[in-house]
Image (cartoon, rainbow, N blue to C red):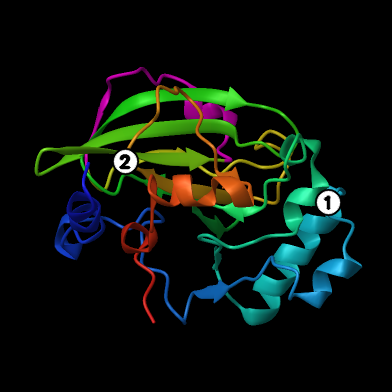
Amino acid sequence: MTLSDLIMIQNIPENLLFPVMGESLTAQNSLEMNFTATNAALTQVDLKNTSLFNDFVFDLLNQANKKFGYGGYLENRVIYRRSDHFQQGESRCFHLGIDIWAEAGQPVYCPFDAKVHSFADNNNFGDYGPTIILEHIWEGNTFFTLYGHLSLDSLENITEGHLINKGEKFCALGPYPENGDWPPHLHFQIMNSMEGRKGDFPGVCSASELNHFQGICLNPNPFVRIED
């Protein structure tokens, strides 16, 4: 896939896309969240304690009176220090998708006509937990969307190759600990290649891998429909 193909996928007309949370993320319903070292408040939270981390996230949303929190594409984050899953070899800290923080049970919708590529329960502490990957085709180009931190029942009655229509609810956010032991949120990611993987794809990479994964993991904002 060429650079022009990648740009074309990222510029699919909005009227052909459905926002993955069922509605656009706006200043009225959403709060941009910062999980980098520049956020001094994170130093006051025991991030390994998911209950305390959960309180931190949802206290912010409740104080701002927002339904969703969002952010994180290519963000250099400190929160992955909570899990050994990201500390094997060179530390992985660069986030390759976007996170949308919301209450467990929040439905997730298919943004573009798709079929199920693969799914799995990636159940390591700090991993995706229940994960679904969809396959899409746009003007002859195949690309993939990944949905992580889902409810376990999102994996029930799902099969590879199953067709899902744009705008169809097909999964929901899971509670901790079944969602990989995170405060409830959706990890949403777009890839132009699965590199032979099924049911999983790196959502965080090390500094030395960043250039490689930037060429695979596209900016997901148009599919989430974040509005200024």
What's the amino acid at mark 1?
A: Ser
> How would you rate the neighbour count of disc 2 (Cα within 10 Å): few for under 14, some for 14-19, many for 20 or more?
many
128 lies above or below 215: above
Residue at 76 percent across and 34 percent down: it is: 88
Residue 102 at x, y percent in the picture = 58, 58
In the displayed orientation, state which residue is furthest to the front: 208
Q: Which mark is residue 192?
A: 2
Residue 31 at x, y percent in the picture = 56, 75
Whether residue 164 is in magenta: the answer is yes
108 lies above or below 117: below
Residue 141 at x, y percent in the picture = 17, 39
Residue 216 at x, y percent in the picture = 38, 44
Q: Which mark is residue 26?
A: none
Q: Earlier in the sequence, mark 2 or mark 1?
A: 1
Residue at 57 percent across and 31 percent down: it is: 130
Q: In front: 3, or 64?
A: 3
Quadrant of the snapshot with the C terminus: bottom left
> Which is the main secondary structure of the residues drawn in magenta?
loop
> How would you rate the neighbour count of disc 1 (Cα within 10 Å): few for under 14, some for 14-19, many for 20 or more?
some
- Left or right, 224 with reference to 72: left
Whether residue 190 is in magenta: the answer is no
What's the amino acid at mark 2?
A: Asn
The residue that label 1 is drawn on is: 51
Residue at 67 percent across and 27 percent down: it is: 123
Q: Which residues are magenta?
A: 149-165
Q: Is residue 104 visible?
A: no
